[in-house]
Image (spheres, grey):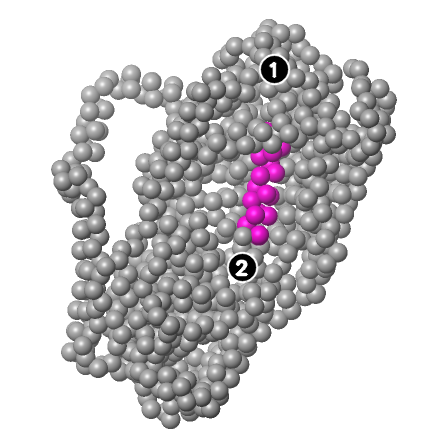
């Protein structure tokens, strides 16, 4: 049996890894020949401003008084250069956005494990192809372009990462630092002959990464005064830098300026998905080689932005974000980045038709080179008889073959086998399917004899099932923090604690002073968590940052949450309640709204589930009903007491899988960081640290899982159900679900797309009905394939929390039930 179990686990690890090898190997290839336009370029140097997190509407629209927030840039649009919207692609994050701008290709799918920090493979870029590049800005962005560059010609100047503090008083200092350091750099160059000669070379790039707008957007939302004022400060800074460049180079007319953004931002201060507020970014260009403003009487766009921005008379030239890379390379005459897929936007160029034609030809040859290398590599690793074009006539033959079966037989077999599984599968695409499932659960006792045998338990089951069914209907992203709901959840926990402790104190035979002290300690921890949440929120609103004492209490609460329950009594309900109290203290610290109530309602349903399974066990006549108050988790059941599987055990396994999925998606879609507000971790830290913040959010996700598994430990114990038998049932359910998702995997889109079924299309010309096309992706497959592996880990953690017993002092005492 152990060999079979180990072999099955190993096979699932292989299946788990296979999806990455099949779909998520980097598409980048190497070995192409550099391509560049042979004609003289219009510019000697290029200045790239990237205002991180700047939405197109925030820059172009007028304020309530009819004035522009960026008067200098608006003047450029009307009198000096060309403008438009740069359409980004998902995921709308900083790293892939900057890679698209500077290297010309979109998200590398193998970057799923790299987060914001760097691309997983080396790639060519505008900076690498330039003679020299100087860059100023965030330490999260600049190093990845210097790391991939060949030779020592890309120079970076970054501030300390601790400056990226969402709780800081003034995030505009990040941009001020960049502008001041650029000025100091040029001042120093006048007294440094070596540097002076370098910055007077041709084919050079200056890159200014401005993070203040993004930081203010995360901390205060794009509608805030902080975000809008930051735009004005950036506009002032750009004006000063442009004036300095013109003065330094004697107005030689050989400098090109490009102002854009890596991504936008939602109204609730996040990004990563495909909402227009995230994918529509500004693009303003002027200087050498750029067309002057073009006055027009009419423009053909499907949106109403031009009238809203009062720019309907100035020609708007939209591009895809990756198109900006070939535009910049053609302006200064360097080779196109080898991995670029961008298409040169010739409408921006102010040059001869010959130059435009040569540039377009070079762009096409550069893209063709990638195809040739990719085809050669594929052919080398593929058997000759398998290297053939894909034929669609395959799918048609399969459909014809299926239709040869009698329709009634086919439909009957299909419905009988897949009905229960499909409910779970659909819940991955539509969260409201969880509501439908929980509603069906609520009606279950009334369809059996449970209602006549245990009316109070049945009513409790129905009530908490319907109450839990509300959560999947609540908004996932875009919700505003509501600390009052967190406080309300804390008060409910305190009220429940009072009732339980009062009840236990009446049972003097099983409740000693040590256990009372543990419960009081947990109640105190809940009170402190409520105080920290309220105090931190107030401090951040006053822009005073995260108080140190609050931070210490938060980390101490987190560290103790898995230890304190081990001090409580191993009696079934006492231990489960102790686990709930400890985990709720941590969950309150990680909550910003209604989700604080979720673990509490889920736990209440789990308590009722344990009771109702006792009723079903007695109803089936398997064994005599045990008194729950007499069962201890530390009681080691002999293997001979395990019974064989019954049909009702399939229902129990299905309940477990359904509750795990509910814990997974009950308050959000965990497949995307976009679904979470960074405010969730502000009680622990406010300085930007993606891996630490991600770890805290992951623990927030795991807490409902732990509660479900601890409850199922009790169900297994009271029903004498072998965990190995359960594992086999869950294995079958998860494998069937995994087959659905394996063939629906897509290897493009945002991490939110990777977590959901809807494809958020940013092209306004596409039919909106396509938004409802079935799009499944890797996270669904990974979630299901991980279920069996993850279940082993959760089962071990649940056993540790429920069966282990620590003592504060003294010798172990025995209690007889």
For image coordinates 68% across by 63% down, the residue present is: 545
For image coordinates 29% across by 17% down, the residue present is: 408
Image check: 408 left or right of 701? Answer: left
Instruction: In the rendered view, tell whether residue 226 sits above or below residue 22.
Output: below
Dominant SS type (magenta): helix
Query: Picture quarter containing residue 456?
Result: top right
Q: How far across and down, in percent of the image, does residue 737 sit?
A: 40, 30
| Residues at discs 2 and 1 in contact (Cβ within 8 Å) | no
Separation (CA) of disc 2 from disc 1? 48 Å
Question: Which SS class for mark 1?
Answer: helix
Q: How far across and down, in percent of the image, does residue 400 sit?
A: 19, 27
**Residue at which label 2 appears:** 269
Picture disc at residue 719? 1
**Magenta part of the chain:** 692-709
> Going from the N terminus, do you reach mark 2 or mark 1 first?
2
Query: Picture quarter containing residue 491?
Result: top right
Which of 365 and 396 lies nearest the eye of the viewer? 365
């Amino acid at each position: 049996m152990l060999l079979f179990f180990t072999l099955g686990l190993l096979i699932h690890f292989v299946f788990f890894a296979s999806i990455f090898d099949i779909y998520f190997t980097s598409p980048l290839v190497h070995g192409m020949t550099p391509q560049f336009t042979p004609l003289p370029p219009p510019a000697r140097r290029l200045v790239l401003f990237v205002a991180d997190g700047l939405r197109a509407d925030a820059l172009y629209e007028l304020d309530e008084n009819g004035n522009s927030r960026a008067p200098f840039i608006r003047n450029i649009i009307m009198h000096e250069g060309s403008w438009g919207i740069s359409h980004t692609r998902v995921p709308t994050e900083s790293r892939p956005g900057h890679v698209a701008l500077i290297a010309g290709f979109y998200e590398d799918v193998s970057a799923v494990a790299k987060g914001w920090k760097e691309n997983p493979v080396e790639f060519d870029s505008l900076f690498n192809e330039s003679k020299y590049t100087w860059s100023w800005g965030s330490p999260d962005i600049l190093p990845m372009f210097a790391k991939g560059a060949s030779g020592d010609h890309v120079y970076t100047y970054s501030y300390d990462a601790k400056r990226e503090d969402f709780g800081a008083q003034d995030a505009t200092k990040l941009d001020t630092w960049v502008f001041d350091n650029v000025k100091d750099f040029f001042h120093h160059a006048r007294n440094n002959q070596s540097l002076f000669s370098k910055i007077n070379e041709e084919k050079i790039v200056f890159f200014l990464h401005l993070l203040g707008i993004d930081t203010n957007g995360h901390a205060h939302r794009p509608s805030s005064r902080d975000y809008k004022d930051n735009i004005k400060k950036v506009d002032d800074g750009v004006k000063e830098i442009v004036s300095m460049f013109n003065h330094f180079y004697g107005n030689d007319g050989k400098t090109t300026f490009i102002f854009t953004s890596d991504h936008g931002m939602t109204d609730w201060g996040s990004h990563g998905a495909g909402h227009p507020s995230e994918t529509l970014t500004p693009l303003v260009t002027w200087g050498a080689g750029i067309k002057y403003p073009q006055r027009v009487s009419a423009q053909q766009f499907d949106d109403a932005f031009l009238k809203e921005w009062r720019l309907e008379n100035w020609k708007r030239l939209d591009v895809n974000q990756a198109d900006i890379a070939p535009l910049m390379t053609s302006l200064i005459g360097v080779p196109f980045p080898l991995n670029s897929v961008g298409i040169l936007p010739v409408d921006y160029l102010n040059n001869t038709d010959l130059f435009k034609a040569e540039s377009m030809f070079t762009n096409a040859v550069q893209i063709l080179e990638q195809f040739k290398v990719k085809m050669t590599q594929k052919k080398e690793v593929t058997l000759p008889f398998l290297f053939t074009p894909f034929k669609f006539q395959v799918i048609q033959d399969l459909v014809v073959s299926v239709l040869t079966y009698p329709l009634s037989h086919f439909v009957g077999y299909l419905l009988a086998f897949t009905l229960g599984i499909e409910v779970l599968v659909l819940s991955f695409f539509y969260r409201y399917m969880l509501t439908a499932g929980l509603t069906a659960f609520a009606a279950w006792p009334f369809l059996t004899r449970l209602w006549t045998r245990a009316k109070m338990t049945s009513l409790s089951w129905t009530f908490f099932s319907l109450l839990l069914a509300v959560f999947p209907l609540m908004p996932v992203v875009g919700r505003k923090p509501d600390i009052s709901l967190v406080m309300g959840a804390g008060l409910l926990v305190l009220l429940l604690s009072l009732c339980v402790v009062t009840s236990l104190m009446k049972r003097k035979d099983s409740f000693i002073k040590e256990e009372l002290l543990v419960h009081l300690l947990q109640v105190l921890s809940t009170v402190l968590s409520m105080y920290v949440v309220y105090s931190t929120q107030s401090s951040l609103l006053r822009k005073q940052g995260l108080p140190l004492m609050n931070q210490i209490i938060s980390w101490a609460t987190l560290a103790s949450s898995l230890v304190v329950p081990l001090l409580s009594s191993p009696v079934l309900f006492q231990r489960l309640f102790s686990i709930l109290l400890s985990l709720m203290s941590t969950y309150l610290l990680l909550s910003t709204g209604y989700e604080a109530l979720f673990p509490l309602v889920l736990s209440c349903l789990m308590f009722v589930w344990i009771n109702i399974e006792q009723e079903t066990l007695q109803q089936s006549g398997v064994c005599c009903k045990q008194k729950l108050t007499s069962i201890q988790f530390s009681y080691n059941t002999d293997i001979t007491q395990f019974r064989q599987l019954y049909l009702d055990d399939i229902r129990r396994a299905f309940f477990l899988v359904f509750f795990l999925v509910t814990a997974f998606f009950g308050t959000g879609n965990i497949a995307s960081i976009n679904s979470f507000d960074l405010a969730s971790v502000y009680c622990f830290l406010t300085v930007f640290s993606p891996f630490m913040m991600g770890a805290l959010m992951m623990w927030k996700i795991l807490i409902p899982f732990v509660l479900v598994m601890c409850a199922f430990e009790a169900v297994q114990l009271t029903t004498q159900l072998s965990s190995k038998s359960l594992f086999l049932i869950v294995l079958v359910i998860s494998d069937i679900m995994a087959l659905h998702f394996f063939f629906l995997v897509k290897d493009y889109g945002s991490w939110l797309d990777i977590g959901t079924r809807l494809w958020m299309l940013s092209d306004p010309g596409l039919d909106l009905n396509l938004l409802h096309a079935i799009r499944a992706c890797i996270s669904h497959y990974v979630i299901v394939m991980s279920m069996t592996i993850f279940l082993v880990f959760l089962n071990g953690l649940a056993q540790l929390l429920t069966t282990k017993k620590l003592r504060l002092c003294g010798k172990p005492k025995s209690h007889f039930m």
